[in-house]
Amino acid sequence: MGLQCSIQNGGVSPPGNGLTYGSHFEWANPTSKDVRLTGCSGFCTADEYYVPAGTLTNPGLAVAQILQNPPGPFTFAETPNEWNTGGTPRIVVNPWPAAKNKDVA
C-alpha cells in the first residue's frame, strides 16, 4: 500500500507518513457513497477526482499526485460532502509552502 489520504479527514496512511511535493498518493474513500472532489488544482495534477465508495473491508481509491510547486490553496470540495472533521476539507503538504520558500541566511 502506498500513501493514502482520507476524503473524510485529510489524514494520511500509513501512520507517520505525510504528503510531500511531487508525491504520488491515493484518495481513500471509506464511505458507502461515491464522492467527487473538485477544486484540487491548487495542489494536485488534476482539478477533479472521482473516488468510488468503499467496501466493508477496503476504501475506494483514486490515484493522484501533488504538484512539485503547488500554488495553493490546499482546500477542496466534496460532492456529496463526507468530510467529518469540521471546517473546510483540506490537506497538509510538508514542508508547508512558507517553509519551502523561507530565506536561509
Image (spheres, helix red, strand yellow):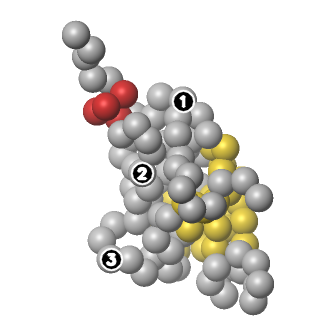
Which mark is first along the chain, 1 or 3? 1
Residue 96 image-quadrant placement: top left
Contact? badges 2 and 1 (CB < 8 Å): no
Give left or right: position of 65 versus 102. right
Q: Which mark is residue 104?
A: none
| Residue 84 image offset from top left, x and y in percent | 42, 81
Q: Residue at x 40, y 37 (%)?
A: 95
Q: Tell which of 38 and 72 is nearer to you.
A: 72
| Residue 92 image offset from top left, x and y in percent | 42, 51
Callout 3: SS? loop
Return the residue at label 2: 92
Q: Residue at x 71, y 75 (%)?
A: 59
Q: Tell which of 73 and 55 is nearer to you.
A: 55
Q: Residues within 10 Å of mark 3 (few under 14, many from 20)?
A: few
Residue 37 image-quadrant placement: bottom right
Which amino acid type is shown beneath numbered disc 3?
Gly
Which amino acid type is shown beneath numbered disc 1?
Gln
Callout 1: SS? loop
Which mark is first along the chain, 2 or 3? 3
Return the residue at label 1: 68
Spatial distance from mark 3 to mark 1, Cα to Cα?
28 Å
Which mark is first along the chain, 1 or 2? 1
| Residue 14 image offset from top left, x and y in percent | 63, 61
Q: Residue at x 47, y 28 (%)?
A: 69
Q: Which mark is residue 86?
A: 3
| Residue 76 image offset from top left, x and y in percent | 44, 59
Identify whether 86 is placed above or below 42: below
Of the two numbered discs 2 and 1 in the rendering, the one whose residue sits closer to the viewer: 2
Q: Can residue 38 be spotted in the picture?
A: yes
Q: Can residue 67 be spotted in the picture?
A: no
Give left or right: position of 45 versus 41. right
